[in-house]
């Protein structure tokens, strides 16, 4: 069995939503065992109200939770027994193979850096996320691509960008069943000499890397088109880009709803376009993608969206288990070993 530690207290929708997802997953035909970290009495009570398989569940008590408005550093210092700290410590000592949390992103990253070991050759961890694309990717024809880093680091050296490329490629191979994902650097031009010094140096290092299907540089307009499977950048740029893509998606959806409510002819037109709108909703539904992997550590960590519902929690746990069973850490190690 793969053991996944779950921060049961994290997330905007509360404990009940996490327990809904966990209880439902425990009844499915899988080899996933879950360690639920949080208020033991509250977790036990919530499980008692739901059908579940107790053989697949274990409860580990913690005190408190990092609120979304808290400073990650201050919260972890002042509340060492909060759910994310206890969960990460359990993962580090081998009580689990992976961790899933829908809680505070900064606290999850900081707790990982405090408790877990970085893989050999990895200087900085990277938070990866999927974004919707026009082009379909891999044998499963996934309508999204991976971008990293989107928030674990503010800046990145050329060495860091190469590491991000290796980690992103490994993750895309495992999760999307894509044996040879294309990887590109996000820059202000497709030419090899465009971008910051770090981007130019990383471009030179990636051209002949034996483990990477390097496609060169891509620009911002290439992201929604999905010209490559994995896009690499520093965390500051990646976070700005990801928030912009999320914002555009929400605006398009809101405009469509507003148009439908206001005008009969628009309603008629939108009805004719309903199939396309349903496809757009499917493409942009982050709940089906499982969450953002925090790459670079010796254990698998999946940061689920703060607004994750029970379905999203289930998918995040499944993604974590899949990454463990297919040896994500080992694949990253092998990629790093081929880097000069």
Image (cartoon, rainbow, N blue to C red):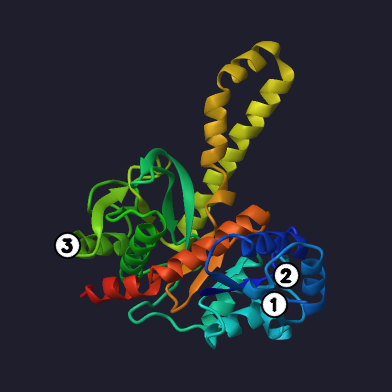
Q: Nearer the viewer, residue 299 or 124?
A: 299
Element type where label 2 sits in the image: loop
Camera-near label (3 vs 2) is 2
Q: Which sits earlier in the primary sequence, circle 3 or circle 2?
A: 2
Q: Which residue position holds label 1? A: 83
Q: Are marks 1 and 2 in contact (CB under 8 Å)?
A: yes
- Disc marking residue 9: 2
Element type where label 3 sits in the image: loop
Q: Which sits earlier in the primary sequence, circle 3 or circle 1?
A: 1
Tell me if mark 1 has few (under 14), some (14-19) or many (20+) residues whose alpha carbon lies within 10 angstroms of its own.
many
Compared with residue 219, is residue 203 higher up or lower down, i.e. above or below? below
The residue located at (69%, 86%) in the rendering is: 80
Q: Quadrant of residue 100?
A: bottom right
Could you give the CA–CA distance between mark 3 and mark 2, rounded to whole angstroms? Answer: 45 Å
Relative to residue 140, is residue 34 drawn left or right? right
Compared with residue 65, is residue 256 higher up or lower down, i.e. above or below? above
The residue located at (20%, 75%) in the rendering is: 340
Compared with residue 247, is residue 76 higher up or lower down, i.e. above or below? below
Q: Is residue 308 visible?
A: no
Tell me if mark 3 has few (under 14), some (14-19) or many (20+) residues whose alpha carbon lies within 10 angstroms of its own.
few
Could you give the CA–CA distance between mark 3 and mark 1, rounded to whole angstroms? Answer: 44 Å
- Disc marking residue 208: 3
Q: Nearer the viewer, residue 68 or 2?
A: 2
Q: Which sits earlier in the primary sequence, circle 1 or circle 2?
A: 2
Q: How many marks?
A: 3
């Amino acid at each position: 069995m793969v053991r996944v530690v779950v921060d049961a207290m994290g997330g905007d929708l509360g404990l009940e939503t996490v327990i809904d997802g966990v209880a439902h997953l425990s009844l499915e035909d899988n080899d996933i065992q879950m360690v639920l970290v949080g208020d033991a009495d509250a977790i036990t009570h919530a499980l008692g109200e739901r059908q579940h398989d107790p053989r697949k569940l274990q409860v580990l008590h913690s005190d408190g939770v990092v609120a979304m408005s808290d400073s990650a550093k201050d919260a972890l210092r002042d509340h060492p027994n909060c759910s994310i700290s206890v969960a990460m410590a359990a993962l580090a000592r081998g009580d689990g193979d992976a961790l899933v949390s829908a809680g505070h992103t900064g606290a999850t990253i900081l707790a990982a850096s405090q408790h877990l070991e970085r893989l050999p050759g990895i200087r900085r961890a990277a938070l990866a996320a999927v974004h919707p694309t026009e082009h379909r990717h891999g044998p499963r024809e996934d309508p999204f691509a991976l971008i990293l880093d989107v928030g674990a680091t503010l800046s990145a050296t050329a060495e860091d960008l190469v590491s991000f490329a290796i980690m992103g490629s490994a993750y895309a191979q495992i999760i999307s069943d894509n044996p040879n994902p294309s990887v590109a650097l996000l820059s202000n031009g497709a030419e090899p000499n465009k971008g910051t010094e770090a981007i130019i140096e990383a471009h030179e290092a990636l051209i002949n890397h034996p483990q990477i299907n390097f496609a060169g540089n891509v620009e911002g307009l290439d992201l929604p088109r999905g010209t490559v499977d994995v896009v690499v950048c520093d965390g500051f740029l990646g976070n700005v880009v990801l928030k912009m893509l999320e914002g555009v998606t929400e605006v398009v959806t809101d405009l469509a709803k507003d148009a439908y409510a206001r005008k009969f002819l628009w309603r008629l037109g939108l009805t004719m376009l309903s199939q396309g709108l349903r496809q757009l909703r499917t493409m942009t539904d982050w709940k089906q993608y499982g969450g953002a992997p925090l790459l670079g550590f010796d254990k698998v960590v999946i940061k689920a969206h703060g607004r994750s519902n029970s379905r999203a929690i289930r998918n995040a746990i499944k993604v974590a288990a899949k990454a463990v069973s297919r040896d994500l850490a080992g694949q990253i190690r092998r990629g790093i070993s081929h880097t000069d």
